[in-house]
Image (spheres, rainbow, N blue to C red):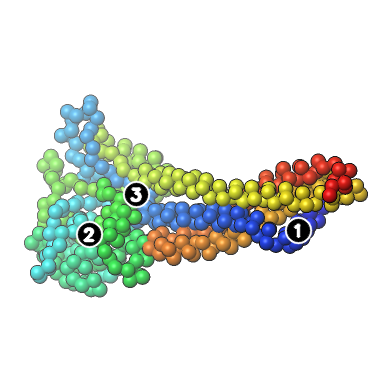
């Protein structure tokens, strides 16, 4: 039997029983819509998590951390100078796979005062120009630290928007203003841009109140870094003050002088690799260099964002498996409905099948016709389900306007559609087999 003829007959049967066909396709429609909706929700959450990972510095960021040396080297712990600028220069000179190095010194527990207002930021850090690139910060107003600031130990600073809000007004651009950090005067030369999660941004744009619950949710939906908890990442980026590294060392004497050398211990040593695919090789290069500068003592380790990326992939896979299984049940139910209606259709058309066989139709022709009708039902239901899926995604966005926006992807739509067509084909196999096996004589005598 010609395939197109089978499809045409299937369409005529659907048209002849519109209401019954619509009810039959309803299960497929709901199944496809729920499957696409589930894919869209997971894709939206994954996109939000990945955006936060990029704010952390992405997979390219590596942090050199302090750690206890191996047991066999415990007696040599005092020999190592720790993380210093010597490490920074050595890495820059001998690690071609490292794109940028950011040495940083944290003041810790600083209080900032302007007039009658005071504030304790999450961090006051001394840094160089590479701080922006490695930690994915951006200056919105003014400038960042320059070579001249570092050479002259200038008393200047760059602040985050949370610090600005606490000491000035939320809309202020306080360039040139003076603030006091632990009783030392500093001039503001730059203001970082505002960082927020997608749910927080949507709340702000909608004018939703900034309640304690909302702020807690924002912290939960954000990412983490520098040993901070994941939920504190955006708050950390907004609630920071950055000074020239040399100014921090000269003004506050931050860092412990090592072995009477004119160098200062670094609180953080962050790196940015040039190629993520060669991350392990880059870390090995840095390890080899640090073993030399630390006099053979392995009192350091490495933190990467790979664990966080793995958690994102794991959570995505779990959500897809769980949600996909639940949504697939609707499609299976729709397939059962198609099988049921095709069996009923065969019972109504036994004499017609007998006549076709009597005039020369082969069993495989009957089989192909019934199977084509079943697939046509599933395909039409799948197409309608895709249209309903778009409406469902809009409704989900309306019901939860401040969450991660669902993302409808062509791949998810294609998988859902092909799954619905496959369900229709499987559901039509038994009715088609049953129709093909009918005895034409018995069928002709059927009343």
Disc 1 to disc 2, how far (Cα)?
A: 69 Å
- Judging from the image, what secondary structure is the residue with disc 1 in? helix
Residue that sits furthest to the left in the current view? 183
- Closest to the observer, 87 or 435: 435
Q: Is residue 344 above or below residue 211?
A: above
Tell me the distance, in whole angstroms, between the alpha carbons under discs 3 and 1. Answer: 62 Å
Q: Is residue 77 visible?
A: yes
Mark 3 is surrounded, within 10 Å at the Cα level, by few (under 14), some (14 to 19) or many (20 or more) other residues, namely: many
Label at residue 240: 2
Which residue is painted at 39% across and 40% down in the image?
Answer: 280
Task: Residue 297: give x, y in percent of width and height.
Answer: 23, 33
Residue situated furthest right in the rendering: 359
Q: CA distance from mark 2 to mark 3?
A: 19 Å
Marks 2,3: beta carbons within 8 A: no
Image coordinates for residue 385, horizontal then vertical, percent: 59, 59
Q: Which residue is mark 1?
A: 13
Q: Is residue 301 above or below residue 410?
A: above
Q: How many marks?
A: 3
Residue at mark 3: 61
Front of the two marks 2 and 3: 2
Q: Position of residue 417 (x, y in %)?
A: 61, 54
The residue located at (48%, 64%) in the rendering is: 395
Left or right of 149 on screen, residue 348 = right
């Amino acid at each position: 039997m010609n395939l197109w003829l089978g499809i045409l007959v299937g369409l005529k049967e659907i048209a002849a029983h519109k209401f019954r066909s619509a009810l039959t396709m309803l299960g497929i429609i709901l199944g496809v819509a729920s499957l696409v909706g589930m894919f869209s929700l997971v894709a939206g959450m994954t996109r939000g998590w990945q955006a936060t990972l990029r704010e952390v510095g992405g997979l390219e960021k590596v942090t050199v951390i302090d750690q206890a040396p191996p047991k066999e080297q415990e007696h040599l712990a005092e020999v190592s100078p720790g993380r210093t600028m010597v490490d920074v220069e050595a890495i820059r000179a001998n690690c071609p796979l490292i794109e940028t190095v950011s040495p940083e010194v944290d003041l810790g527990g600083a209080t900032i005062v302007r007039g009658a207002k005071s504030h304790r930021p999450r961090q006051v850090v001394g840094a160089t120009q590479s701080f922006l690139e490695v930690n994915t910060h951006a200056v919105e107003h003014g400038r960042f630290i320059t070579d001249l600031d570092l050479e002259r130990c200038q008393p200047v600073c760059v602040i985050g928007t949370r610090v600005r809000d606490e000491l000035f007004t939320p809309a202020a651009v306080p360039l040139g203003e003076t603030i006091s950090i632990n009783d030392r005067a500093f001039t503001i030369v730059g203001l970082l841009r505002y960082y927020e999660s997608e749910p927080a941004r949507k709340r702000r744009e909608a004018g939703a109140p900034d309640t304690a619950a909302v702020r807690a949710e924002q912290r939960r939906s954000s990412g983490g870094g520098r040993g901070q908890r994941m939920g504190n990442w955006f708050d950390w980026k907004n609630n920071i003050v950055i000074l020239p590294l040399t100014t921090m060392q000269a003004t506050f004497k931050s860092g412990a002088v090592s072995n009477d050398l004119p160098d200062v211990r670094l609180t953080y040593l962050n790196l940015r690799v040039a190629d993520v695919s060669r991350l392990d090789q880059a870390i090995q290069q840095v390890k080899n260099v640090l073993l030399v500068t630390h006099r053979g003592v392995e009192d350091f380790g490495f933190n990467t964002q790979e664990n966080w990326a793995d958690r994102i992939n794991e959570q995505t896979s779990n959500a897809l498996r769980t949600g996909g299984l639940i949504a697939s049940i609707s499609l299976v139910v729709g397939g059962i409905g198609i099988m049921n209606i095709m069996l009923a259709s065969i019972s109504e058309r036994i004499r017609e099948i007998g006549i076709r066989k009597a005039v020369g139709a082969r069993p495989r022709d009957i089989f192909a016709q019934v199977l084509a009708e079943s697939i046509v039902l599933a395909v039409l239901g799948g197409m309608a389900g895709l249209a309903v899926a778009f409406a469902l995604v809009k409704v989900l966005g309306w019901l939860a306007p401040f969450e991660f926006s669902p993302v409808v992807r062509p791949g998810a739509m294609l998988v859902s559609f092909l799954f619905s067509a496959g369900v229709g084909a499987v559901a039509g196999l038994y009715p088609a087999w049953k129709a093909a096996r009918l005895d034409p004589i018995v069928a002709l005598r059927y009343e």
